[in-house]
Image (cartoon, grey):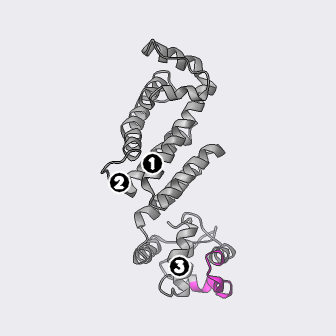
Amino acid sequence: MLTSDQLKQVVHFDNRSQRDCILIILAVDVTVAKDITTIREIGACAGVRKVKSWNISDILAKAVGLAIKTYEGWELTDQGQQYIQSLIHATDLNVVITNASQSLRQHLKLVTKPKSAVFIEEAIVCFEARQYRAAVILSWVGAISILHHEVFNNHLTKFNAEALRRDKKARQVKNIDGFCRTGEHDFLNVIEYIGIIGKNVKQTLQNHCLQLRNACGHPNSLNIAENAVASHIEILTLNVFSRF
């Protein structure tokens, strides 16, 4: 629900009570239960230094309906999450961005290759900063780069044969830079044909992600917001970054 940076903005707003501060801390990486030591550490890192002296167990025990103690530690109830949403709304922190960011960061955990993770992490940072066009472009560039390397390392002979069959004037790809001579739309057609990606994945990448990337890469009157960008990054994460 909240990132560490967003925590700082929310927890210091409007003279929060001890209870609200601790509940807000529980909203950081909200799917993970937290013990008392972790709550103190997160709070201290966010500038809530007095949290070290608070009786956190007693405070949370009195927050009936908002937090519960499980085997793993303390966590927010559904009612508690709704309560935190109301606190976030009062700070003018975009709730859609907050929720989408949390979801995207969960998907990020599926990405095992460091270079791939860096691309998507930077795109998420742009998204959280509301730099939407940059997030779209950066995530697409990273995804297409990963696909280029996948083809070059594992499917180059098949790719060159199919590209030449489609275009007798096509030049064989001999290094990574050679892919720049093939348009991204055509590149996706070829790798779908030789079985690297499925038809539905290809169509989604072409008709959703590539079109949005092209629109964001040129001056125009297009306006985009958090939902479209979150969807774009999520599609790339699930179908490219976490697969190759």
Q: At label 1, which amino acid type do we have? A: Val
Q: Residues within 10 Å of mark 1 (few under 14, many from 20)?
A: many
Residue 1, placed above or below residue 103: below
Q: Is tag 1's residue or tag 2's residue first in the polypeptide sequence?
A: 1
Q: Nearer the viewer, residue 114 or 138?
A: 138
Residue beneath disc 3: 11
Residue beneath disc 2: 224
Q: Residues within 10 Å of mark 3 (few under 14, many from 20)?
A: many
The Cα atoms of the two marked residues, 1 and 2, are separated by 10 Å
Q: Residue pushed farthest front?
A: 219
- Asked whether residue 15 is drawn in magenta, I would say no
Residue 67 shows up from this direction: no
Label 1 secondary element: helix
Q: Residues within 10 Å of mark 2 (few under 14, many from 20)?
A: few
Label 3 secondary element: helix
Q: Is tag 3's residue or tag 1's residue first in the polypeptide sequence?
A: 3
Q: At label 3, which amino acid type do we have? A: Val
Residue beneath disc 1: 136
Q: Residue pushed farthest left?
A: 221
Q: Position of residue 197 (x, y in %)?
A: 49, 30
Q: Position of residue 154 (x, y in %)?
A: 62, 25
Q: Position of residue 16 (x, y in %)?
A: 51, 85
The Cα atoms of the two marked residues, 3 and 2, are separated by 29 Å
